[in-house]
Every structure is written in C-alpha cells, then in structure tokens.
Image (cartoon, rainbow, N blue to C red):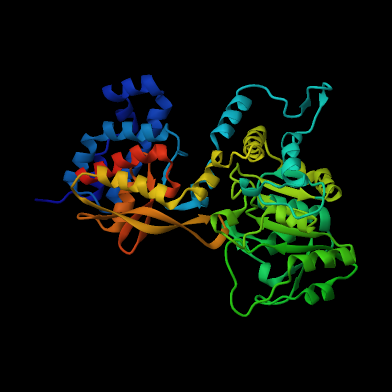
Amino acid sequence: MKTASKPELFRKLPSVDELTHGTALIQLSSQEGEVAVTDAARAVLARLREEIAAGRFDEAGVNLAVSGLDRAIERQLRESLTYSLRPVINATGVILHTNLGRAPLAPTALDHIRETAAHYSNLEFDVNTGERGKRDVHVDRLFQKLLSEPLNRGGAGLARANSGSAQQVFTIVVNNNAAAVLLALNSLAEGGEVIVSRGELVEIGGSFRIPDVMMKSNAILREVGTTNRTRIADYEKAITEKTRLLLRVHRSNFEITGFTEQPKLEQLIELGKKHDVPLMEDLGSGALFDLRSIGVSGEPGVLDSLNAGVDVVTYSGDKLLGGPQAGLISGRHDLVQRMRSNSLFRALRVDKLTYAALEATLLAYVKHDHDGIPTLRMMRTPKDEIGKRAETIAKTIPQGDLSVEVIDAESVIGGGSAPSATLPTRALALTSNKRTADQLATRLRQSNPPVIARVEDGRVILDLRTVFPEQDEALQHTLAEITAE
C-alpha cells in the first residue's frame, strides 16, 4: 500500500473556516464567542501541522486526529479560558519555596485584602483631618510597636530586645528586597563609595547580584578583604572622604566554612560611628520570629540588628516574615526620610493590596498570634503531629500500583533563609510498580490540583509539613486515583 506523502497528509486537514462553521463549533461559539473558538481552532491545527511536518503522523493517525478535532478544539478553548496561575499542593517540604510563591498568606490577610480591594479605602486619606495622608502610616504604626518599643515577650516567639532603651525605628515599604537595596544605596551613597566584603558579593535568585544593583544605584563598589577572610582593619583602611556607606550582606543562601574570618557586627557598628559613616545591613529574609525557638541558630533577626546599632536594615516581606512580597527598609529616621524623599520611592512603592496583607500579618505578630501565620505555623509544627497525618493518609491508600511507606525526613526553610538548617519531619515515600520515580512525580504534577513532590533515592517523597491539613483529602484522592490506574 502506498504511504501518503506529507503534502497529502496536510491536505486532509480542514480549514479554520470549515471547522468553525461546523454544527458543534457553532454552538460553542454562541456560548464562548466566535473569536475565542477561532483562536482555539487555529492553535489545534497548528499543532497538527507541526506533528505532520516532524513525521510523527501517518495517514491513519491524521484521520484519527481529524475525527476528534471538535473535541480537541473544545479542550483547547477550556484551557485558554482558565486561569494559568492556580493553587498547587506543596509536598516538597520547602516552606518558603520561591517557585511556588514563597510565604502563603494568613486567612486574616486574605480577608483584609478582600474588604480593602472590594471597596474604596483610606489608602492615602486622613479621615480625621479630611486631608491627604501617606500610605505607609498603615503599617508604620505596627512596625513601631514591633521594632522600636523595648520588648520582653519571653516565650511568645518574638526576638527580644537587648537591655536598655531601643532607638526609634521608622519603616518604609517597596515592592521587594532588591528594590529596597537599590533605593537605600541610591539615597545614601549615590556618587560615593560603599565598602563591602568580597565574601558578601552574593547572587540570589533571578540573577540579582549585589555588584550589579550597586552599579544601577550609581554608588561605587569598594571591595575589601578576600572571599573567605575579611577583617575589620580591611574596612578601616578603605574609608576615605568618598565613603558614604558600610554595607554588610547576609549570606542567606549559602555558607562559607573552614579557613574563614568575618568582622563581628559590633565592630562594624563601632567603626561606622567612629568615622560617622552609616552601616546598612541587607538581611534578605528578615525574621521577626526568634528562630532559636525552633532549633535554628545563626539566622539574625531584624530586631537583633537594629538593637545592636545598625543604622538601616533591608529585608523581605514574603520570606521569614510570612507576609506578601515586599521590600522593607527599617532604620534611623533621618536616613529613612532621605529614601522616602527619593523619586525612586514612588516608582518602587506598593499598592493597597500589599499594604492590606502586610498590615494583617504584622497585626498577628502584635497579637502574638504566630500560628495564625502559615509560615510560622509550618516551622513550629512538631514532627509527631506531621507523622500522625502521614500515617492516616498511608492507611487510606488502597492496594494497587503504589507502595506507600511513612519515613523520617527533613524539611528546609528555603527562600534563601538558614541554608544549613533542617527541621525533622515525617513523610510519605512512594514507589510504583508501573512508573519510575520521575514518571510518578510527573503524574502527581498533572493531577488537579497539581501535587509538587521531590525525588530521592528512587522514591517520591511527600513531606506533609508544607501540605495544609485541609489539602489532605485532595492528596488522598490523587493517590487513590493513581493506584487505580
């Protein structure tokens, strides 16, 4: 039998006009609109032409595809009209997973966003005077409580202030920590030099590099020391009349171990005061929560740095703080005021939805409602509690393709925070009789909602620390479906 040539296979495909005027698609057009249906038809036909051109279809395959064109176009249309951004089940055990949106928001934050977004608000309006107000007052009052007033909360979870009176701290908000660093450098050091250790010239996700952002800020980088060893004398030797700022960058996503040396924060503070040069610290993650209470050490908190005497601290809203994406700048009033007066501040400012989410998150801290913030609750959840949920799910999985075992494992904080810290957990380890571990992980991602897991030692690991309890039922349903396939 003669094999059909590619031109002959192409001629078997109907035109877009023929398709859209068929009975089934005319009805679909009346429901969803002719333009949307036509676009879907073009997309389906374009894929078929690509398959034919690549030699993946013979005559029988093309005939089968043509017979199912109406259904394929309807599927394409449904996909094009649904949200691309959608919830997933994070079973990776990475609490602040950058690719999965970092910190989930608290229910109170969602409620505050909803009521603020659905109506007009007093975003920049002073209801007492009837005059224009400033949008950052809505969160600055809460930052004042959390960062300026001497705290003694004991086991409540907040970092303690050092003894003595705390300096008054002011805070402004921009759209992420990279913007916070850019604004601070431009405001405090434009045209002058910023001294930073070579061991702190870091790169974080998205190719954000300290030297690059410094160049964009029009500040001049003055590197001191070496990658592994920098002494306080290196900073002092580099100070000249051109020096505008001392910069300390927290190595939030890696560690340098072995033959190393780094000046203590107190030494840099003392040096800055001696030469009347402000000290800025880019904390990155920026915890208001005392991580030592969950066994994580070496991750400085915002309050620790400010109470020690750092002039300006920059940090993220959607990492250890557990709030929305934002860049937060806290510090001396005169320095923060210079940033607020910078025209860049308006370009980098955040909207009412971010302020609403941030205000609700900070209010939870003020109320000591730490378990009301999902990120903190996940970090604080005991291993045994996670294990009970894992055992319950394992018992519900019927006999079939999947083999399920509950194992000891480790969760990580993620998001460039405490890179070496781990939290003990219990997890489901899955193996399949029909699929490799990678194939099983792919199948989980294709479920609804998608389940994102990790693969270790030929097994798929589902860490329930990062799975919300209300998602357990959906996870059970997905695993039961896979078992039955």
Q: Can residue 91 be spotted in the picture?
A: no
Instruction: Give x and y (percent) for residue 1.
Output: 8, 50
Pick the front one: 4 or 36 = 36
Q: Can residue 289 be spotted in the picture?
A: yes
Instruction: Give x and y (percent) for residue 320.
Output: 59, 50
Q: Left of 316 or right of it: where is 89?
A: left
Q: Left of 434 or right of it: where is 120?
A: right
Judged from this view, the residue extending furthest toward the bottom is 259
Q: Residue at x 37, y 20 (%)?
A: 31
Quadrant location, the C terminus: top left
Q: Residue at x 41, y 47 (%)?
A: 385
Q: Is residue 470 above or below residue 456?
A: above
Q: Residue at x 83, y 59 (%)?
A: 278
Count the numbered circles shown.
0
Q: Is residue 256 above or below residue 135?
A: below
Q: Left of 156 or right of it: where is 222?
A: right
The quadrant where residue 17 appears: top left
Instruction: Give x and y (percent) for residue 163.
Output: 77, 54
Pick the front one: 57 or 221 = 221
Q: Left of 399 or right of it: where is 188?
A: right
Q: Is residue 74 above or below residue 448?
A: above
Pick the front one: 120 or 148 = 148
Instruction: Give x and y (percent) for residue 461.
Output: 35, 55
Judged from this view, the residue extending furthest toward the left is 1
Q: Is residue 442 above or below residue 29?
A: below
Q: Residue at x 74, y 54 (%)?
A: 313
Pick the front one: 441 or 250 = 250
